[in-house]
Image: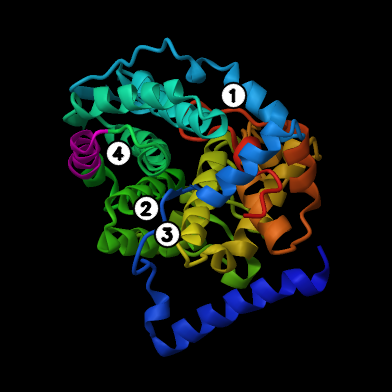
C-alpha cells in the first residue's frame, strides 16, 4: 500500500475527530441514523470476501476455515445446554453453566460463519436451535463474575444473530424478538454501566453493549457504549503524551500516584504501549486489546470509525506485547523483569485495520500475527479471526 493511500483515511479520520471535539458537533456522537446489518464485528462485504477466498482455496483463509470446520463448535450434532440461571464466581468457580453458555454462543457464531461460507442451511438451522434454546431459558446471571460472564457471552451472541437474521430467511420473527428480549433484559443490565474493575472487564462489557445496541437498533445504548469506550481506552493503554502517569477512567476514584501504580499491578515506569494489565499477565491483556479492536471494528462498519481515535494506543500496545510474546528479552524495569506470557489469538482484527487499512508499520505485530495463523479461539469471546479479518479490505 502506498503512503499516499494510507495517509488519506488517517488524515480524514483525524480531521473529523478534531472538528467534532472543537465544535461539539453531532459528529462527536456515535450512533448512525440507520444501523448496518449484519454489522457486529463482521459486515456482509467482509463475509463475501472471506467466502470468495475459501471457495478459491486461497491461503491463509482456507486453512483458517479448515481449522474452524474441524472444531467442536462447528458440529451439527451439538446439543445446547441452556440454564435459567448461570452462576459464575471468580475464575468461573463455581461454574454452573459458565462454560456451557460461552461455548454455545461461540458455537452459534461458528455455525453462522459456516452457513455463510457454505450456504448449507443445516448450519443456520443449528445456530438458530442454539440461540432459541438459550433465549427460551435464561433469566439471570449470579455471583461475582456475573458482569464479565455476561460480557463474554453477549459479545458473541449478537455476531451470530446478526449473520443469521440478515442473511438467512428461516429464523421465525417471534424467535428473533425473543432473542432480542434476552439481550435487552438478561445481558444488557449487566454490561451497560461498565465496571471499575480491571480494564479488560469494562472493555469486554463495552464490546457486549455495542453489539447488543446494533442488534436492537438502539442508538442511545450505542452512544453510551462509545462514551464508555472513549473513557476507558486511554486509561488502559499508556502513551508518553499522557504525562508522568497513566490516565484514569472516569469515576475510577484513583487520585494519587500510589493508587495508580497499584492499579497498574505495581508498575511504576510507563512507556508507550504498556497496558494496565501487562504486569498481571498477557492473557488478560489480550482480552482487553481484543475488545478494543472489536469495538472499533464494529464502529467502522456502522459508519463512525473509532480506529483513528485509538490508533496510536492500540498499535503501540499490540507491538509492545508482541515483542515479548515473540521472545524478546524482558528488561528489569518491566514487571520486575518477568512476564507471564500468553497473549492469545487477538491480533488479527487490530492488525488488519491499523496496518492494512491505515498503513501503520507494525513489524512485531505482523510477525506474531503471521506466526499464530490460522488463529483459533480463546474459548471465551474471540474466534476465527484469521478467517474473518486476515488481509480483509472490506
Left or right: 349 in relation to 105:
right
* Quarter occupied by the C terminus: bottom right
Residue 183 painted magenta: yes
In which quarter of the view is residue 271 placed? bottom right
Q: Which residue is mark 2?
A: 210
Alpha carbon of mark 2 to alpha carbon of mark 3: how far?
Answer: 10 Å
Mark 2 vs 3, N-terminal side: 2
Identify the residue shown where x is 79% and y is 59%.
Answer: 361
> Which circle's residue, 1 or 2, is located before the other in the chain?
1
Q: Which residue is mark 1?
A: 68
Q: Mark 2 touching mark 4, by CB under 8 A?
A: no
Q: Residue at x 66, y 49 (%)?
A: 392
Q: Nearer the viewer, residue 354 or 200?
A: 354
Q: Which mark is residue 195?
A: none
Q: Quadrant of residue 358?
A: bottom right
In front of the other: label 1 or label 4? 1
User: Closer to the observer: label 3 or label 1?
Assistant: 1
The residue labelled by disc 4 is 147
Q: Quadrant of the N terminus?
A: bottom right
The span shown in magenta is: 172-186
Q: Residue at x 42, y 59 (%)?
A: 229
In the image, residue 48 above or below residue 356: above
The mark found on residue 229 in the picture is 3
Percent across and percent down for residue 30 are 39, 68
Secondary structure found at label 3: helix
Q: How far across and down, in percent of the image, does residue 246 sit?
A: 53, 62
Amino acid at each position: 500500500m502506498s503512503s499516499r493511500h494510507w495517509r488519506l483515511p488517517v488524515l480524514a479520520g483525524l480531521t473529523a475527530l478534531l472538528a467534532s471535539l472543537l465544535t461539539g458537533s453531532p459528529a462527536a456522537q456515535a450512533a448512525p441514523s440507520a444501523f448496518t446489518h449484519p454489522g457486529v464485528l463482521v459486515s456482509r462485504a467482509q463475509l463475501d470476501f472471506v467466502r470468495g477466498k475459501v471457495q478459491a482455496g486461497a491461503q491463509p483463509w482456507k486453512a483458517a476455515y479448515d481449522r474452524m470446520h474441524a472444531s467442536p463448535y462447528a458440529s451439527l450434532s451439538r446439543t445446547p445446554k441452556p440454564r435459567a440461571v448461570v452462576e459464575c464466581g471468580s475464575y468461573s468457580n463455581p461454574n454452573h453453566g459458565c462454560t456451557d453458555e460461552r461455548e454455545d454462543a461461540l458455537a452459534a457464531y461458528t455455525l453462522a460463519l459456516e452457513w455463510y461460507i457454505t450456504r448449507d442451511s443445516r448450519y443456520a438451522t443449528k445456530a438458530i436451535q442454539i440461540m432459541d434454546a438459550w433465549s427460551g431459558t435464561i433469566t439471570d446471571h449470579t455471583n461475582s463474575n456475573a458482569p464479565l460472564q455476561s460480557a463474554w457471552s453477549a459479545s458473541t451472541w449478537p455476531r451470530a444473530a446478526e449473520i443469521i437474521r440478515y442473511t438467512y430467511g428461516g429464523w421465525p420473527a417471534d424467535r428473533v424478538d425473543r432473542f432480542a428480549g434476552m439481550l435487552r433484559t438478561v445481558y444488557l443490565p449487566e454490561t451497560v454501566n461498565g465496571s471499575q474493575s480491571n480494564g479488560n472487564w469494562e472493555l469486554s462489557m463495552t464490546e457486549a453493549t455495542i453489539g447488543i445496541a446494533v442488534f436492537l437498533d438502539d442508538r442511545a445504548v450505542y452512544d453510551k457504549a462509545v462514551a464508555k469506550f472513549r473513557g476507558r481506552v486511554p486509561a488502559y493503554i499508556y502513551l508518553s503524551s499522557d504525562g508522568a502517569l497513566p490516565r484514569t477512567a472516569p469515576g475510577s476514584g484513583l487520585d494519587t500516584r500510589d493508587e495508580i501504580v497499584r492499579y497498574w499491578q505495581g508498575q511504576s515506569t510507563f512507556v508507550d504501549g504498556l497496558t494496565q494489565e501487562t504486569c498481571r499477565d498477557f492473557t488478560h491483556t489480550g482480552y482487553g486489546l481484543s475488545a478494543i479492536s472489536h469495538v472499533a471494528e464494529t464502529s467502522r462498519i456502522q459508519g463512525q470509525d473509532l480506529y483513528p481515535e485509538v490508533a496510536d494506543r492500540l498499535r503501540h500496545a499490540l507491538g509492545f506485547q508482541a515483542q515479548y510474546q515473540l521472545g524478546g528479552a524482558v528488561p528489569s524495569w518491566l514487571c520486575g523483569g518477568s512476564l507471564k506470557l500468553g497473549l492469545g489469538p487477538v491480533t488479527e482484527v487490530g492488525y488488519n485495520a491499523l496496518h492494512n487499512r491505515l498503513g501503520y508499520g507494525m513489524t512485531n505485530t505482523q510477525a506474531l500475527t503471521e506466526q499464530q495463523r490460522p488463529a483459533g479461539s480463546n474459548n471465551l469471546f474471540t474466534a476465527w479471526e484469521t478467517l474473518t479479518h486476515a488481509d480483509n479490505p472490506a
